[in-house]
Image (cartoon, rainbow, N blue to C red):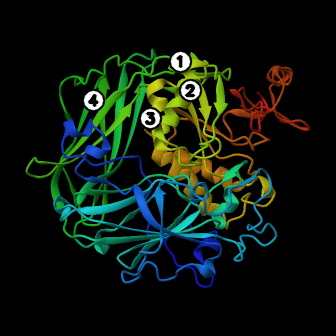
């Protein structure tokens, strides 16, 4: 949403959750060559990490914050320093709060969405950066992987935008604000916002810039997003690979004679069919988007499952009228099909799957929500060693690297939207139109980011957030983007929208009885199902600390 509020701050306005943000898209980094695209992000000449040491100031209330800190002449030499990404509570600023159902005190549950101005800590961040000379004439974007719970951004004293929705990325086009060197980046983060009403998960409450920050640059005409999927034949043998690509022209002139090429490589990095599939030539007007879809028949590709996580490399190449490569994008892809059978079985490539899964919070004893990569690897290895084949991202989208690991090691993912209102689920969001756009934004941001991961086999609308029209709208918006995966929602007690039955803490006997009776719900609120569906015990063996040993 890109409209300014009139009389209340953005962080207390449920209808404003982003100003000047780029549309959500899959995780991508531009490269200059197909060979380079197979490497690490850090090796791209069009990528700069802004992780590291930033200048930092922390206050308890918004009125105490240094209001003009974003101005170039404002001196921050005497400020303290903080590492980014991190949670400021884990660095000695403020108090980490643990609560389950009840909202923290600063979030007013009587006057919604009112935040207590007498205790809403604000973290002010500053750092400088330079722009490489080879980025001249290109579009430049800044990416925030996760900031909790709301923030403003300035470049060289100019206000760029605002964002909330802490568990999915926020990106801004900063091209027009930049100088050649000594650019000043200022970020103002609020601990609580109206977005906090939608983030009442049973967990430790942390704040700050807790995921990576980086810059990337693109040509004026560039690959803005892509969506990769496949259709397997009735024998689950051969496949039709489909890649839908969005190109955007940020330039001031209309462009003609552009082409998109597609390469598919197996795990030995061999080209499949040795040919690059080229799309038709297309033109694109200034300030517009062009959509193109490429299709290719792939003979008997290796299939992706939890037991056989076969991955291919997909390389997308954009060429100009001179047949020069101007941009290359890359992703991993697995050929697989998700279905629900007539008898309610969950199928991967036509075979029934039994989930042996766990819920996983992003929590580290040393770093809070800023999870180091080695901790993710540790979790994955522990899961595989203990025959765990599925994970629920309870209760928000996880770090993008987690999905890459699940793709690689073979873990089925129930990807959950960052939406929980346990302490107010009888009021928020239900069918309240004041929350509709924010709910849609959270769902769309997750689906757009994670749609290309084969490990994601179910989309979840959230957790313990009540029920109402807003959830039906969220489902419809998700299916507009991706209809290849079923929708899950634990709070759908009447089974109106969830394609997967979901219960919590039932005993094995209760589950068996429900399956035999074809019923679902919670004790005292059981309903008869109109058709068989997969049954998932979405939470079990609830543990605090070491209470389960």
**Residue at (75% x, 61% y) in the render:** 104
* Distance CA(mark 3)–CA(mark 2): 22 Å
* Distance CA(mark 3)–CA(mark 1): 24 Å
Say which quarter of the image contains residue 354: top right
Element under disc 3: helix
Q: On the image, numbered disc 3 is attached to which residue? A: 404
Choose the circle earlier in sequence order: 4 or 3: 4
* Distance CA(mark 1)–CA(mark 4): 24 Å
Residue closest to the eye, 93 or 500? 93
Q: Are marks 3 and 1 in contact (CB under 8 Å)?
A: no
Choose the circle earlier in sequence order: 2 or 1: 2
Up/down of 312 relative to 281, above or below? above
Q: Are marks 2 and 1 in contact (CB under 8 Å)?
A: yes
Q: Are marks 3 and 2 in contact (CB under 8 Å)?
A: no
Q: On the image, numbered disc 2 is attached to which residue? A: 339
Pointer 1 local density, CA inside 10 Å: few below 14, some 14–19, many at least 20: some
Pointer 2 local density, CA inside 10 Å: few below 14, some 14–19, many at least 20: some
Q: Is residue 454 visible?
A: no
Up/down of 310 relative to 208, above or below? above
The nearer-to-camera label among 1 and 4 is 4
Q: Are marks 4 and 3 in contact (CB under 8 Å)?
A: no
In the image, which disc is placed on residue 350?
1
Pointer 3 local density, CA inside 10 Å: few below 14, some 14–19, many at least 20: some
Up/down of 145 relative to 524, above or below? below
Image location of residue 136, percent across then percent down: 18, 64
Q: Are marks 1 and 4 in contact (CB under 8 Å)?
A: no
The nearer-to-camera label among 3 and 2 is 3
Element under disc 2: strand
Up/down of 304 relative to 504, above or below? above
Choose the circle earlier in sequence order: 3 or 1: 1
Side of 433 where 239 appears, left or right: left
Q: On the image, numbered disc 4 is attached to which residue? A: 264
């Amino acid at each position: 949403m890109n409209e300014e509020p009139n009389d209340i701050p953005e962080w207390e306005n449920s209808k404003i959750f982003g100003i000047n943000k780029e549309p959500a898209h899959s995780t991508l980094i531009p490269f200059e060559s197909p060979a380079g695209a197979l490497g690490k992000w850090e090796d791209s000449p069009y990528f700069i990490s802004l992780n590291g040491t930033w200048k930092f100031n922390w206050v308890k209330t918004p009125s105490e914050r240094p209001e003009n800190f974003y101005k170039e002449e404002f001196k921050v030499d005497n400020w303290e320093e903080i590492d980014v990404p991190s949670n400021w509570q884990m660095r000695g600023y403020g108090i980490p709060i643990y609560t389950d159902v009840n909202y923290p005190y600063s979030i007013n549950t009587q006057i919604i969405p009112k935040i207590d101005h007498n205790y809403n800590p604000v973290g002010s961040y500053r750092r400088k950066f330079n722009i490489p000379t080879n980025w001249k004439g290109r579009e430049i974007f800044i990416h925030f992987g996760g900031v909790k719970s709301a923030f403003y951004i300035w470049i060289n004293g100019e206000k760029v935008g605002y964002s909330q929705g802490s568990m999915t990325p926020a990106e801004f086009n900063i091209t027009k604000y930049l100088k050649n060197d000594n650019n000043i980046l200022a970020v103002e983060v609020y601990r609580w916002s109206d977005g906090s009403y939608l983030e009442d998960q049973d967990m430790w409450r942390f704040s700050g810039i807790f995921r990576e920050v980086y810059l990337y640059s693109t040509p004026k005409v560039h690959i803005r997003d892509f969506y990769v999927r496949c259709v397997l034949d009735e024998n689950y043998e051969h496949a039709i690979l489909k890649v839908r690509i969005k190109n955007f022209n940020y330039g001031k002139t209309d462009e003609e004679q552009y082409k998109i090429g597609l390469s598919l490589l197996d795990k030995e990095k061999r080209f499949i069919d040795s040919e690059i599939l080229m799309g038709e030539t297309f033109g694109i007007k200034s300030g517009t988007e062009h959509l193109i879809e490429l299709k290719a028949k792939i003979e008997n590709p290796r299939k992706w499952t939890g037991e056989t996580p076969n991955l291919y490399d997909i390389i997308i190449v954009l060429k100009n009228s001179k047949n020069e490569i101007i941009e290359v994008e890359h992703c991993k892809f697995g050929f697989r099909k998700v279905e629900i059978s007539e008898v309610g079985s969950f199928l991967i490539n036509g075979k029934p799957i039994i989930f042996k899964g766990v819920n996983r919070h992003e929590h580290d004893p040393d770093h809070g929500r800023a999870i180091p990569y080695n901790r993710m690897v540790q979790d994955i290895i522990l899961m595989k060693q203990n025959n765990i084949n599925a994970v629920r991202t309870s209760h928000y989208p996880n770090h993008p690297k987690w999905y890459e690991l699940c793709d690689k090691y073979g873990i089925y993912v129930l990807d959950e939207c960052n939406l929980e209102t346990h302490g107010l689920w009888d009021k928020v969001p239900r069918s309240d139109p004041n929350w509709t756009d924010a709910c849609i934004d959270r769902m769309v941001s997750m689906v757009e980011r994670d749609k290309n991961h084969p490990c994601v086999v179910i989309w979840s609308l959230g957790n313990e957030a009540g029920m109402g029209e807003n959830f039906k709208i969220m489902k419809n918006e998700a299916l507009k983007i991706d209809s290849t995966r079923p929708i899950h929602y634990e709070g759908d007690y009447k089974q109106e929208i969830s394609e997967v039955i979901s219960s919590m803490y039932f005993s094995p006997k209760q589950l068996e009885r429900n399956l035999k009776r074809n019923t679902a719900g919670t004790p005292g609120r059981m309903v008869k199902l109109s058709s068989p569906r997969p049954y998932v015990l979405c939470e079990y063996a609830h543990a605090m600390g070491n209470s389960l040993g």
